[in-house]
Structures are given as structure tokens and as C-alpha cells.
Amino acid sequence: MSLKRSLPLVLILFFVGIVVFLRQPDNGGHRARSALIMGTVVDVRVYGEDEKRLEKALDEAFAEMSRVEQIFSNHIASSEISQLSAATEPLVLSLETVALLKRGQQIALQSSGAFDMTLGAVKKLWNIENNRSRIPTAEELADALEGTGSGALVIDGTEVRKARAGIMVDLGGIAKGYAVDQAVRKLREYGVRSATVNAGGDIRLLGDKNGQPWRIGIQHPRQQDALLLTLKVKDQAVVSSGDYERFFEFNGVRYHHIFDPASGRPARQCQSVTVVADDAASADALATAAFVLGPVDGLKLLEDLPGLKGLLSLLMAVC
Ligand code: AMP
Ligand code: MG
């Protein structure tokens, strides 16, 4: 693809795909725990001398992520987001939910609508997460897209109104990153200075590892055991969006879980995007947005972001 050659190599590395995982020796002075949260295995490792304190911090971090899941999951009927999706009237939501919706709206604006939290009905049609996937008809997609995009959610104080009752909200592109940030906040609160939180590739590093940066391996998405490179990162988030995470194939075509809001179909320009930023929620939403925008506009988004530019140190787009 001639496009590849025209893009700045410093910021973009072209691979077939990327998944991020942590590479660190498992030596003493740490505690590790994993759990299934938001449909993803979340792995937290905390480092330090006081093992009791480490255990307590892990308890608190996991409790916090479960709390976040209860608010934002669209698999939990009582969650605020499920209630908003089902609502036919304006709904008063918590300050926390409104704040996350506003952050998402800001990234939607910055990405010219590529990041879209109102694709819940589209997601439901494809059913990619449930192993009962199917390709929706054009008519079904048009119905699901009706009223989505900018203006779909009107926020007034803590009251949220949908432009159309049928609009379904989905925070799948940002909530995992937010949960990771909240976990790190808890770990800090309980005195942890060195930790890694990895929610299925949404990673945040707290501090460093014995004075050295964390080493994060970037794995080839189409060749499970191949490592493409290792990043050295401290005190930042590394988040990937990819077409290898959740997908099905039909007639040789891969249908995955990141949708182009313009068509309601899987975005086709990238296979993976990795963003390094100061916080995981921003990195999460920006990776999803850049994935949809593709290498040229995606990179431009990350370069141009007013006020956010300094957050991004690396983008790897696979196209
Ligand atoms: P991520 O893995 O962070 O890229 O997020 C993918 C998830 O975000 C999907 O499973 C959907 O729940 C949701 N999603 C899909 N397409 C979009 C989009 N264009 N904007 C925002 N969220 C999306
Ligand atoms: Mg995301």
C-alpha cells in the first residue's frame, strides 16, 4: 500500500496487527490477582514490601472495578447505562456516569464522530460478543443507526435525554480504560507505588519496576507467539484496539467489534491501533476512534488534539 510510505515512521509502525501484553519477571515482593470483569480477564500485579498492604490494595482495586462494571455494563440490567438504553424519558444519572459520557462526547467531537457511544443497537444486531453473530441487513443497520451520532445524547446537568427512544448507549470503547484508571487510583490510595493493571490489553503502569521502566511486549495479532517489539513505559497507559479481539469470519471476510458509525459495519482501514497516554480511559477511547479513522486521519487526530497532544507518545497503526 503506497499510503504506508507517506506516513511518518516515528509515530506509526506498520504491522499485521498488535496486541499488548506485559513482560516482566515474576520475582519476589509482589502480589498478583486476576478476575473476569467486563467480559475480560483483568490482571493486577502490585509490588512492595508490605504484603498485607498489597493484598488490601488488591481487594480495593478489584472491588472498585466491579463497582464500575455495575454502573457501565450493558450486560447488567440495573446498570445506569442499561437504564439509559431502555429509557423513553429523560433520566437523571450519577455525576460519575455523566462525567464519563461527557468525556466520550468530547472524544466523539474531536474524532468527527468516529468515536460513538450510541452504537448499542448496532452492536446488538451483530451480536459479535455472544457467538451467535450474523451479518445484519442494510435495512436493519439503517434502523439501528437512526438518530445516532452527534446530538443523540443531550446532557443537561445530570439529566440525560436521548434524541430517539430507541437509541442504545454502549461504553464498550471507554469503560474498560476508565475501570483501569479507577483501579490505579485505588492502588495509589492504599499506598502502592509500583503496579501494573492489565484489562485484556488495556494496560496502565503505576510507577516503575525497581527504578526501571516496565517492558511491554507487542505481540503479532495473527501469529500468537510472535513478538514485534518491546515498549519501555512508566506511569502511563498503553491501550490497543484491534480486529483480532472479537470477530467472526464468513466467506473469508473478518467481521469484528469496532464499527464505523457511518455504516454500522466493522471499520476496515486498520487491524490494530495502540495508544500510549497518561490515562487509560483517554487511550481507550482514542485507540477506538483512531482505529475507525484509519492511519491518516487517526494519526492526525492524535497529533492535533488540543490539550491532549502531550498525552500521546506513540501510535502504532496496522493497516
Ligand atoms: P475497543 O476494544 O476499546 O476498541 O472497544 C470496542 C468496543 O467499543 C466494542 O465492543 C463496542 O462495544 C464499542 N464500539 C464499537 N465501535 C465503536 C465506535 N465507533 N465508537 C465507540 N465505541 C465503539
Ligand atoms: Mg477503546
Image (cartoon, rainbow, N blue to C red):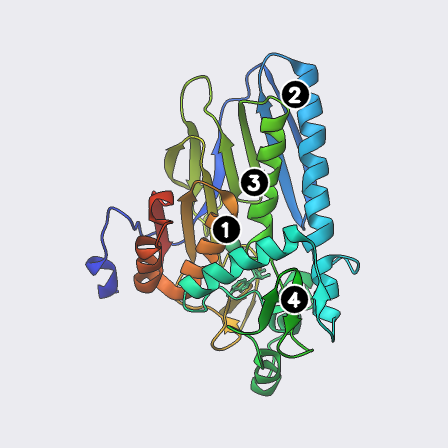
The residue at which mark 1 appears reads as 284
The residue at which mark 4 appears reads as 160
Tell me how far mark 4 sits from mark 2, CA to CA.
Answer: 39 Å
Image quadrant where residue 51 sits: top right
Q: Residue at x 70, y 71 (%)?
A: 90
Tell me how far mark 1 sits from mark 4, CA to CA.
Answer: 23 Å
The residue at which mark 2 appears reads as 54
Q: Residues within 10 Å of mark 4 (few under 14, many from 20)?
A: some
Q: Residues within 10 Å of mark 3 (few under 14, many from 20)?
A: many
Q: Residue at x 51, y 37 (%)?
A: 204
Q: Label 1's element?
A: helix
Residue 248 image point, x, y percent: 58, 65
Q: Label 3's element?
A: helix
Position of 266 with respect to 6 (left or right) is right
The residue at which mark 3 appears reads as 181
Q: Quadrant of the N terminus?
A: bottom left
Tell me how far mark 3 sits from mark 4, CA to CA.
Answer: 24 Å
